Structure formats: structure tokens, C-alpha cells
Image: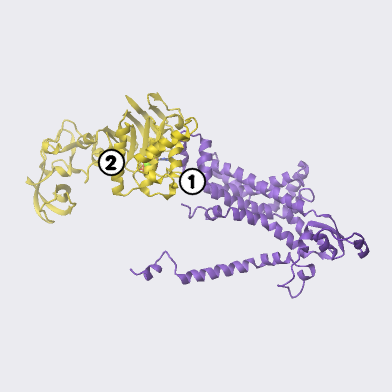
Chain colours: A yellow, B purple
């Protein structure tokens, strides 16, 4: 059952088309991540769900009802904003209680207290309840703003880069926690980020946004392996997918209409035959190493094991794991029927 | 790193610099306060002391100025005063030493009350209307917004007294001359442009996300304004209120022109406190001192808000 959906929704700001003809269905208990670079229309898409923006065309549905004409308060949603989500003049407790005290909810103050305490414990901020919102660390603030969404049990959670202002370590912690909480509550979440790692780890499905258009919506692995086009292929994977001219790296059997070949760095094989290449740089990152190769004038990234003996300036042979290459046509769309990655070793 | 080197690190100033800064600030404060202190002192001098030359710094304090400020008196013969019997109060006694008797209260208390009603009334109105207008200009799509804002500001581009004659005639026609309502409306009109502009700056600084979060959580727009925006505008409102009050409180020209009896405020009244044989300087000084108090108290009460507000958002978190 679709818990929430956008149906052919378009939103313009003057000349800018922020969201263009987007259709997206989110099922009950699903975690959908919208991924895209800055200005792609991620925030606008969330705001359309929330009713903070009104679409020029199309419908918004939540919990099976057309809510296109409804005000945000009537939509039964919770929103975690990209920034500024806590009220500085309130304590943490008051911030968490604020959504519960809204007119029409009519909860007793004992019930409010109980619920806030529960959520604070879940997010491990119970010792900070009496602090002012401004007296928190960045990580605690983010927890509280996520908590503000969690105190209610809305049909749909909307989260706009809730972890973006945190350092890497904290981000990872909160990411894991958020996923755990989502599973525990069975919450339906639309989550926005431009961080591919966040998208890969959190999402049941990822929606790739490009300039207001939804390029592809699929499971993370599916997008990684079968991207709809070059843009989607570039969004996932680090280093990015190598894009090569037809015929490079001795790749054959290109389907009709192919113009570009995409090869993931982990699919580049060194010294297993192929064509001559020169190692330009090599970066050791601990568990893996990234080599930048010069193959007949084009630069190719290759992902190697941690213990590679390659040196800068060395001459090697480079090829592609058979069947791992992706073919894209003139309009950058992936050609179907082309290669699937075959190696079972990758299927861990 | 030694403790010594941290003491001279960038953020923290050394003891020496602090001392120099303190001396400079206190020195400036003293210079700036000399006229105020002099007025305060003059209020407690006797009339001869107040015009003595060279000026007296040390003198015998008396409450004569304050008594004269609040009373009207008439000169009487010694026989008459003796026939009254012993003075009933300390101020009767004070007045009789100068061969006078108190004939009643002066009009100062009424004028002072007018000042309070008109000053605080117009400040409240200007800030109230200004807050709503500023919120509207900041958050809504108002047609011709920029032109309207410029128009509002343009009312401040000439000295208000330039429109004195038209306002005088208008008020006479409308029956607003010499009424508290008329003065409140006038001061509100003059202050409103300042209030709208100052407050709009403060509303602009408050991220919309706060209200949007409240609206998503189930609050109406007005509740979001009341519960989320207004508390964060506190320092801005305080700063604006003080500016408005200071203008309305000190305004002299319109008060002189438009009020003469009923609604006269303190500023045009104080200079015409006439004593025996010329101006009664201690009474004028006493009036000025009492006149200063409300603004001082108001400012002290709001000082915490003001410190943050007066930087106009520059240092606000
Ligand atoms: N209120 C607005 N008025 C005018 N243009 C807007 C408005 N909001 C968004 N836009 C435009 O719409 C486009 C999409 O903006 P949006 O905020 O959705 O991007 P985003 O994907 O969230 O980016 P980011 O990662 O930087 O947050 C941008 O080109 C932006 O300039
Ligand atoms: Mg955004």
C-alpha cells in the first residue's frame, strides 16, 4: 500500500523548475532516500509532501488521501529541517513537547511527559532535557530535532539532511541509530541527502534527482549495478565510475547504439592481460588503494587491495572484469541487455 | 605552553589592556555625565546657591526645588504667616522660611501624567502595529512591497516639524488639539516608520523554518507567530520600544504647538516653571530630574534585551 505518493508533480519558482513531473510512491514502513547534488530539488520535493509548497501540477497523497489542498497541519506528517529546527527560547523538554502540545491534540501533561521521556531515552538525551536548546552540542541538537519528529506517530516522516552538519564519526553513529529506530517503529520516511554513503546505508530505495527530475528510483544495489543513465551511475560509487570512449580498454561486444562505456573502479583488473597503461598516482586508504591510470590518453581509476605493490610511474596491463562494463547510448541512457556483473565473489 | 603565553593569546586581553580600557570608559562616562550630575545637584540647591558665581560644588542640600516643583505658593506678610499657627508639615515650614504659603498643588503632576500616558501609549501602539507590519512585510508577498517600505521610510526624510502647520489645522478641525488621543496618534505615526524598519530587520533574521516547523506540527500561522516568532523578537521589540519611547518622551516642538492645557506634556511645561523674580532654577532642575526617571527605569529594566537587540543582529546567535 502506498503510504505517501507524489503524482506527476511540478513546482516552479518563476523561471526555475525546481521539481519537474515527479512521481514517487512510498510504501508503508519504507525508507526512501532522495539523492542529488545541491539545487537538485530535494528540499522542494520534501516541502511538497509537507504542504509547505503547493505544486502547480499534480497531486500529493498521504495515507491514501489526496492532500494536495490541505494545510501542513492537516497532513499528519513530521518534518526535520536541514537546519534551525530547535526553538532557542525553549528547553530540550519544551522543544520535544512542542508538537504534542499543538491545539487539537489534547494530550494530558502526564502523557506528554511520558512520551517525551521515552523518546529522549531512545535518542540518549534524557540527561539534557532541562538544557536550553542553545546549550547543546551539534550532535545533541540533531538528536533533539529528530526526536521532535519522533514524539508524534505521523503517517510520514520527512527529513531534510538531518545529519549534514555533523562530523563523520557522529554522522555514522546517528545513521546507525536512525536506521535502528526506523525499523523499531516501522516508520515511513522520506529522507534527503547528497551523501551517497548515507543513501546506500539507510535506504530501502533511493530516488536519484537531477535538476528537478527523478532519474531513477530503485534499491541501492540495483541503482549501483543497473543505473538508468550516466548521471545515476555517477551518483553512487567512490571513486566515481570511469567513463570511456567506445573501444577503450579492449572492451568488445558493444551493443548497437552504444557511445560511452562505464567501468566501476573495482572492475578494473591490473596485469591480467589487456592494454598497456601507466600508473599516474596511487593512494593508500587503509583497507584499499586507488590507482589512477593513464590508458591511451584517458584517465582511469582502479580500486586495488590494500597490499598492492604498484608504484607511481610503473607500466602495467589493464583490462575489465568480463561482463562488468556498462554501455550508455548517445542520450546517456544505459543500454539494456548489456553486461551484468557475473562474479559471485562480489555477491557477499 | 606556559600559563604566561596563554594569558596573552588572541582572544583574551591582558590585565593592562583591561585597565586602560576601564579607565577610558569610566573617564568618558564621567565627562558625559557631568551635565546630568549638575542638573541632579541643582535640584537640591537653594535658589541663591543655584545661580551663585563661581558655581558651588559643595552646598547645603534642600528640598526646596522639589517642593516648588509640585506646589504653587504666594508671598505673604509676616503677620499673616504668624496668624496661621505653627506649620503642619516639613514642606510648609520650608516654604514659610521664604515668607510664602502653599496655595495648592502645581500642574506638574498632571503634565507628568500626560507625558506617561502619551509616551507609553504611543510607544505601545507603534511597537504593536510595527511588529505586525514588520511580520507581514517580512513573510508575505505584499504587492509593491519595496515601494511601500520606501514610502514608509520616506515619512522620516523631512523633520516632522515641517508638517506642523497642516497637522495643527487638521487637528483643530478634528477636535484633536490638546487631547491625549491626538498626541498618541501623532507620536505613533512618527515612530511607526522607525518601528517597522527596525522590527522588519529582526523578523528577517528569524529563519522561516521555525514557523514552518510549528505549522507542520499542527499549529496555526498565528499561533506559530505568537509562540515562536514573538519570543525571538523580544530583544528587537525592546530596542525598538526604547527608541520610540525616547522620541515620544522628549518631543518638544509638537507638544508646544498642539497642547496647551489638558494634554500638555512635561517638556513644554518644565521651562515655564516661574519662580519669584525669574526662573526658579532648582525647581526646573528638579523637574528635569524627575522627568528623566521613567526612561532611565525603562531602559534599566530592558537592559538585558537591549544589549542583544542594539547590535541589530550582528552578534546574535
Ligand atoms: N523559495 C524559492 N524561491 C525561488 N527559488 C527557489 C526557492 N526554493 C528553491 N528554489 C530553487 O529551486 C531549486 C531547487 O532547490 P532545492 O532547495 O529543492 O534544492 P536542494 O536539492 O534541496 O539543494 P541543497 O542540497 O542545496 O539543499 C534551486 O534551483 C533553487 O534555487
Ligand atoms: Mg535542500
Q: Residue A176 carries which label?
A: 2
User: What residue is at 73 percent from the left and 63 percent from the top?
Assistant: B285
The secondary structure type at the circle numbered 1 is: loop
Q: Where is residue B189 in the image (x, y as percent from the top left)?
A: 66, 46
The secondary structure type at the circle numbered 2 is: helix
Left-right relation of A10 to A321: right
Residue under label 1:
A89
Q: Position of residue B95 (x, y in %)?
A: 83, 62
Rendering quarter of residue A125? top left
Q: Can you tell me whether the CB of the residue at mark 1 lies under 8 Å from the nearest atom of ligand 2? A: no
Left-right relation of B108 to B201: right
Dots 2 and 1 on the same chain: yes
Residue at the bottom extreme?
A: B54
Residue at the left extreme?
A: A273
In the rendered image, is residue B216 in sight? no
Q: Where is residue A101 in the image (x, y as percent from the top left)?
A: 47, 35
User: What residue is at 91 percent from the left and 63 percent from the top?
Assistant: B82
In the rendered image, is residue A230 in sight? yes
Amino acid at each position: 500500500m502506498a503510504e505517501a505518493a507524489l503524482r506527476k508533480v511540478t513546482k516552479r519558482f518563476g523561471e526555475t523548475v525546481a521539481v519537474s513531473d515527479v512521481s514517487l510512491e512510498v510504501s508503508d514502513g519504507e525508507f526512501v532516500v532522495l539523492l542529488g547534488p545541491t539545487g537538485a530539488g530535494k528540499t522542494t520535493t520534501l516541502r511538497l509532501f509537507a504542504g509547505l509548497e503547493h505544486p502547480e501540477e499534480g497531486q500529493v497523497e498521504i495515507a491514501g488521501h489526496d492532500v494536495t489542498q490541505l494545510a501542513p497541519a492537516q497532513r499528519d506528517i513530521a518534518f526535520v529541517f536541514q537546519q534551525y529546527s530547535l526553538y532557542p527560547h525553549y528547553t530540550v523538554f519544551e522543544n520535544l513537547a512542542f508538537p504534542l502540545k499543538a491545539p487539537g491534540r489534547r494530550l494530558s501533561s502526564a502523557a506528554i511527559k511520558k512520551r517525551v521521556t521515552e523518546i529522549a531515552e531512545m535518542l540518549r538525551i534524557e540527561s539534557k532535557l532541562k538544557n536550553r536548546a542553545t546549550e547543546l552540542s551539534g550532535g545533541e541538537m540533531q538528536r533533539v530535532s529528530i526526536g521532535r519528529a519522533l514524539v508524534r506517530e505521523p503517517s510520514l516522516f520527512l527529513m531534510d539532511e538531518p545529519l549534514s552538519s555533523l562530523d563523520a564519526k557522529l554522522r555514522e553513529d546517528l545513521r546507525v541509530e536512525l536506521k535502528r529506530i526506523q525499523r523499531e517503529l516501522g516508520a515511513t520516511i522520506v529522507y534527503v541527502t547528497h551523501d551517497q554513503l548515507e543513501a546506500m546505508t539507510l535506504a530501502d530505495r533511493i530516488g536519484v534527482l537531477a535538476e528537478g527530475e527523478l532519474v531513477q528510483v530503485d534499491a541501492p544495489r540495483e541503482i549501483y549495478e543497473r543505473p538508468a543513465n550516466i548521471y545515476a551511475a555517477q551518483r553512487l560509487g567512490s571513486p566515481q565510475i570511469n567513463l570511456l570512449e567506445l573501444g577503450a580498454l579492449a572492451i568488445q561486444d558493444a551493443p548497437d547504439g552504444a557511445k560511452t562505456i562505464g567501468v566501476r573502479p573495482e572492475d578494473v583488473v591490473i596485469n591480467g592481460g589487456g592494454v598497456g597503461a601507466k600508473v599516474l598516482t596511487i593512494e593508500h586508504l587503509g583497507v584499499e588503494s586507488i590507482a589512477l591510470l593513464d590508458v591511451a590518453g584517458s584517465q582511469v581509476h582502479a580500486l586495488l587491495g590494500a597490499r598492492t605493490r604498484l608504484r607511481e610511474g610503473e607500466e602495467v596491463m589493464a583490462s575489465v572484469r568480463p561482463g562488468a562494463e556498462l554501455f550508455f547510448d548517445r542520450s546517456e541512457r544505459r543500454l539494456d541487455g548489456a553486461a551484468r556483473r557475473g562474479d559471485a565473489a562480489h555477491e557477499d | 605552553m606556559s600559563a604566561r603565553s596563554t594569558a596573552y593569546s588572541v582572544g583574551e586581553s591582558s590585565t593592562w589592556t583591561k585597565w586602560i580600557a576601564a579607565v577610558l570608559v569610566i573617564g568618558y562616562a564621567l565627562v558625559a555625565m557631568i551635565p546630568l550630575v549638575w542638573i541632579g545637584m541643582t535640584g537640591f540647591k537653594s535658589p541663591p546657591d543655584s545661580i551663585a558665581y563661581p558655581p558651588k560644588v559643595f552646598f547645603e542640600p534642600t528640598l526646596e526645588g522639589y517642593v516648588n516643583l509640585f506646589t504653587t505658593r504666594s508671598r505673604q506678610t509676616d503677620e499673616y504667616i504668624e496668624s496661621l499657627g505653627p506649620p503642619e508639615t516639613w514642606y510648609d515650614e520650608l516654604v514659610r522660611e521664604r515668607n510664602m504659603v502653599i496655595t495648592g498643588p502645581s500642574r506638574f503632576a498632571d503634565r507628568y501624567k500626560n507625558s506617561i500616558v502619551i509616551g507609553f501609549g504611543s510607544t505601545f501602539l507603534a511597537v504593536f502595529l510595527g511588529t505586525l507590519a514588520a511580520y507581514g512585510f517580512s513573510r508575505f508577498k505584499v504587492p509593491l512591497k519595496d515601494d511601500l517600505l520606501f514610502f514608509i521610510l520616506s515619512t522620516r526624510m523631512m523633520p516632522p516639524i515641517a508638517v506642523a502647520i497642516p497637522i495643527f489645522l487638521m487637528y483643530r478641525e478634528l477636535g484633536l488639539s490638546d487631547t491625549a488621543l491626538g498626541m498618541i496618534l501623532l507620536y505613533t505615526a512618527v515612530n511607526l516608520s522607525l518601528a517597522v524598519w527596525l522590527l522588519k530587520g529582526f523578523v528577517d533574521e528569524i529563519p522561516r523554518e521555525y514557523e514552518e516547523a510549528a505549522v507542520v506540527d499542527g499549529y496555526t500561522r498565528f499561533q506559530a507567530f505568537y509562540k515562536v516568532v514573538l519570543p525571538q523578537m523580544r530583544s528587537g521589540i525592546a530596542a525598538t520600544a526604547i527608541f520610540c519611547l525616547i522620541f515620544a518622551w522628549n518631543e518638544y516642538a509638537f507638544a508646544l504647538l498642539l497642547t496647551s492645557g489638558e494634554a500638555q506634556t512635561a517638556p513644554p511645561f518644565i521651562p515655564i516653571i516661574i519662580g519669584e523674580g525669574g526662573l526658579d532654577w532648582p525647581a526646573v532642575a528638579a523637574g528635569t530630574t524627575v522627568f528623566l526617571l521613567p526612561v532611565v527605569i525603562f531602559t534599566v529594566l530592558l537592559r538585558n534585551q537591549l544589549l542583544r537587540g542594539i547590535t541589530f543582529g550582528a552578534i546574535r546567535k
